[in-house]
Amino acid sequence: MRISPLRSAFFYIALGALFTYIAIQSADETIFNFITIALATFATIDFVVAVRLMNLHFRIKKANDKDKK
């Protein structure tokens, strides 16, 4: 059974939110330390992947609707 792109997108959004939360918690006095910047980078990558997966889901859905007509 395949996992749909929309379900994967929600998974990546959850991971991005988790990394963002951990990055906020790891910022003690300043945000300019390696751990905080690395976690923020991972969160950004996860959010971008989620948006691309949502876009893919809607393009597949549109193509399937066009084929049914």
Image (cartoon, rainbow, N blue to C red):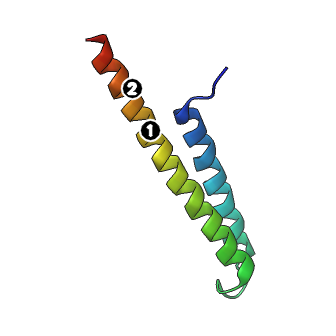
Residue 26: give x, y in percent of width and height: 74, 74
Query: Of the residues shown, which amino acid type is indicated by label 2?
Result: Lys
Location of mark 1 (residue): 56
Where does label 2 land, which residue? 61
Q: Position of residue 35 (x, y in %)?
A: 74, 76
Quadrant in the picture for the N terminus:
top right
Q: CA distance from mark 2 to mark 1?
A: 9 Å
Q: Identify which residue is drawn at 54% across, 35% down.
A: 5
Q: Which residue corresponds to the image point at 63% horizontal and 42% vertical from the top-left? A: 11
> Residue 64's quadrant in the figure?
top left
Q: Nearer the viewer, residue 62 or 6?
A: 62
Q: Residue 41 occupies which quadrant of the picture? A: bottom right
Q: Amino acid at mark 1?
A: Leu
Asked if residue 68 lies left or right of residue 14, the reply is left
Whether residue 36 is situated above or below residue 58 in the rendered picture: below
Q: Secondary structure at mark 2?
A: helix
Q: Which mark is residue 8?
A: none
